[in-house]
Image (tube, grey):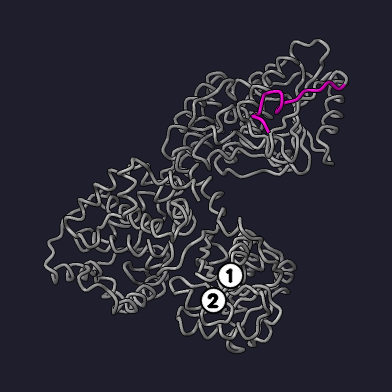
Amino acid sequence: MGAATPDSVVTTARVGAILVVTVNNPPVNALGVAVRQGLAAAMAAAQSDDAVAGVLLVGAGKAFIAGADIREFGKPAMPPSLPEVCRAIEDCTKPVVAVLHGAALGGGLEVALSAHYRLALPAAKLGLPEVSLGLLPGSGGTQRAPRLMGAKAATELMLSGKHLSAKAALAAGLVDKLVEGDDARAAGLAYINELLAQKAPVRRTRDIAIADPVAALADLELLKAETAKKTRGLFSPLKIIECVQAAVQLPFDEGMARERALFLECLDSPQRAGLIHAFFAEREVVKVPEAKAAAPRAFATIAIIGGGTMGAGITVSALDAGYPVTMIERDAESIARGRANVEKVYTGLVAKGRMTEEAKAAVMARYTGSTSYDDLANVDLVIEAVFEDLEVKKAVFKELDRVCKPGAVLATNTSYLDIDAIAAATRRPQDVIGLHFFSPANIMKLLEIVVPAKVSADVVATAFELAKKLKKVPVRAGVCDGFIGNRILAVYKQAADYIMEDGASPYEIDAAVRGFGFAMGPFQVTDLAGGDIGWATRKRRAATRDPKARYVEVADRVCERGWFGQKTQRGFYLYPEGARVGQPDPEVLAIVDAERAKKGITPRTFTADEIMRRYMAAMANEGANVVHEGIALRPLDVDVTFISGYGFPRFRGGPMKWADMYGLPQLLADIEEFAKEDPLFWKPSPLLIRLVQEGKNFDSLNHSA
């Protein structure tokens, strides 16, 4: 296949007096430079040909136009720009009709808004999702959508990034007519001929007045206050509102100029770079060597061992994906509790009006509880989610080995334990894999797929296929204590403890981390998860801890008092009467003071910036070690893990992308500076040192796997 040329990706054909313009740029008709040139040429041809009475815009394949070509962002702009193309369509003196089937998103919808009439087929999806890439609709979307659907509705559509169905788009005023069928070209020709027969005028969106501008501006002020609160520190949402204000207050051409200026500001923003990195990283993360080497095994039935919070969450995920699920528990009482844990989720949805009683009954009909492993004789895939104890898990796998059919996939949900040791408890280590779900498993997106030494490639491929079916974001991880996420978490949590013992309060640290863009700081997370979990891990590791390593005992003192966080109404914070949001606790500060005194530490003050320099250096440096050791295939796998499972601010692209944008030489200099205080903890990763020496960044390693 040669490079796309304007006449290969945009074709024109005369049908009677209609010029049919077809965009054919597979897979989704993205608006690359050749498509823009082709559309501009087609509009010029239609305008200058007296035999043409009207123009029909259609997309070939499954979409109208699914948006701009994201890969062109950040590269020099090639003419014509999309606003110019949209202007040429709108300026046409003959009626232009856009037929929307499949995706009409972003720039694709902006093209349609420039047409004079819009026809939709039932499968059409309309949206302006630029906000999710740190951008705003920059080709008239912020000026034309408010004229068609009202300022408030248009702004909400752009801020949400969500898609509208054809029916919803018709009700909103974005399309003029909805017709049944799936032949876009035939439907479009019938509609445009009907319009011409009625002598329908050329109707330019830019000429429509926005209804009730005073009320519109009041709505936008309210949205602005809400958005500032909700989108903590995000750049493009408030710029979108500014553009719509311009649409209400300024003549069209001035509004367009304002939109363009703000679009270019978004394009230059580091947030845009972070969000686009996250967008591509989530698509690259599934490209793993095993999935290239082998096809997944077929699986139609799933079993879950354990009905606690985690087992129930995984069960809900599997039920939601349409699978029949058998849950195994020790005794009748535990099974009743497991079933109740599953049912509670659906009862909650029914109560909120998001599910009917009938739908709940239909889902629960696919659930079977049992106390006998023999019921798993024909199951295709088993996920064990019992207590985090190696001996307990090995006993479960011995049973699975006894009852499961040959070729069944046996997965363990563990956060830390050695999966090679679990696999060794069976006679079929090639079938054993780690699936580390995050709690609550039916809501959290991340799934770490942990690949032990003896597992076969088709089992890894099956795990990625399962993730897709469960709508999870899968990341391939190697076996080590904590895999990718929890291993790195342990290190930056340690850094936070050191900062606390050196002088910052846990509340200052949490505030700095929230200021960076996380939803919660590390001490809030500890209280939410339960302080006893980390305490158990620290006790488990006490014997193997380096006696020379610095160890902060504050969390142990808090746990010794029975303060495990939200579930006990106090941890690092106080939670009076089951409050979800904690209040600072003077008694915790007294514990911190006592620990400092015991170690002879004179507390010093830290700015939020000094806190984050240490916190992020610890995170990125351990991320580099994880890549260096092959626990993660690429830096982007670390990024996706943290965005999907650890609340890392998406607009910063992940810890490794953050490090690239911060600058690796500066990061290395920071670590060397901190090493003067504690050389044992602050050891620069060999990978970081090598990349700085070679003048490269982490992103240079993303394209090699």
Which residue is painted at 69% across and 37% down in the image?
26
- Quarter-of-image position of residue 355: bottom right
Q: Could you tell me if the residues under marks 1 and 2 are in contact, i.e. CB atoms within 8 Å?
A: yes
Q: Magenta residues? A: 1-15
The amino acid on which the numbered mark 1 sits, given as a three-letter code, is Ile
Query: Dot 2 corresponds to which residue?
Result: 385
Whole-percent x and y of residue 162?
61, 45
Q: Residues within 10 Å of mark 1 (few under 14, many from 20)?
A: many
Count of numbered circles in the view? 2
Query: Dot 1 corresponds to which residue?
Result: 314
Which residue is painted at 40% across and 53% down in the image?
518
Element carrying mark 2: loop
The amino acid on which the numbered mark 2 sits, given as a three-letter code, is Ala
**Lateral position of residue 617 relative to residue 83, left or right:** left
Whole-percent x and y of residue 633?
47, 56
Query: The N terminus lies in which quarter of the figure?
Result: top right
Q: Is residue 498 above or below residue 553?
A: above
The residues bearing labels 1 and 2 have C-alpha atoms spaced at a distance of 9 Å
Say whether residue 5 is magenta: yes
